[in-house]
Image: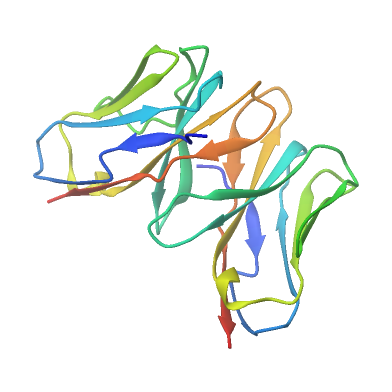
Amino acid sequence: DAGVIQSPRHEVTEMGQEVTLRCKPISGHDYLFWYRQTMMRGLELLIYFNNNVPIDDSGMPEDRFSAKMPNASFSTLKIQPSEPRDSAVYFCASGIGGGGELFFGEGSRLTVL
Amino acid sequence: GQQLNQSPQSMFIQEGEDVSMNCTSSSIFNTWLWYKQDPGEGPVLLIALYKAGELTSNGRLTAQFGITRKDSFLNISASIPSDVGIYFCAGQGRGTYKYIFGTGTRLKVLA
């Protein structure tokens, strides 16, 4: 079975550029979560969706970050403009029903120079 | 952001030894999840717990949902070199579908 698929796996960009990270959740899962992982702050929840609708975006750091889920099989996390402090590994995770198991993708490692 | 307190932060053990780690929170949780993360990869789900007092095993791994609903424990028996990695707990509180993650326990196994 295909797991959560993220792209790109690695992205190196320059400060000020737009970055778009992509996620395909596991088929049939109705919850999708975006997390950011850094050494200093660990795994932080940025935003989560239920049935393609954003439910809680209180973890989104600032207006430069936005996330969308146009359909049940695709979500994007966009950073515009990017800054060096955005460098981190961004994970997408999906689950069923919201109260059960959560499955992670391999992550997108972002480096902003 | 909010995090769970996970201990120990790191452990160095001999192959064959048993390992124990735990997570504590000031809040009550309805679900506890335990993950292992290898370098350059995403967290992989090991065990899920849904009821206070629940004890669940997955091979050499055993996890428990604390009676107070504010803590959880993970034990690894007879450790092997491939157990090396970072172990995370995650908790989900009442009335929310947010999962909050612990700070991680870095495990190193000496052959």
Point out residue B17 in the picture as x, y percentages from the top left corner. 73, 82
In the image, A68 versus B47, the foreground residue is: B47
Point out residue A33 in the picture as x, y percentages from the top left corner. 48, 30
Tell me if B65 is positioned left or right of A112 in this view. Answer: right
Number of numbered discs overlaid on the protein picture = 0
Instruction: Name the residue at 24% across, 28% down.
Output: A64
Q: In which quarter of the image is residue A100?
A: top right
Tell me if A10 is positioned left or right of A32 in this view. Answer: left
Q: In which quarter of the image is residue B96?
A: top right
Rendered image coloring scheme: rainbow
Tell me if A108 is positioned left or right of B20 in this view. Answer: left
Q: In this view, does A94 lie above or below B66?
A: above
In the image, A42 versus B19, the foreground residue is: B19
Point out residue B7 in the picture as x, y percentages from the top left corner. 66, 65
In the image, B80 versus B22, the foreground residue is: B80
Instruction: Name the residue at 40% across, 57% down.
Output: A40
Q: In this view, does B72 lie above or below A52?
A: below
Point out residue A61 in the picture as x, y percentages from the top left corner. 35, 34
Instruction: Name the residue at 71% across, 83% down.
Output: B16
Tell me if A84 is positioned left or right of A69 in this view. Answer: left
Q: Is residue B110 above or below residue B60?
A: below
Instruction: Name the residue at 37% across, 44% down.
Output: A107
In the image, B11 versus A4, the foreground residue is: A4
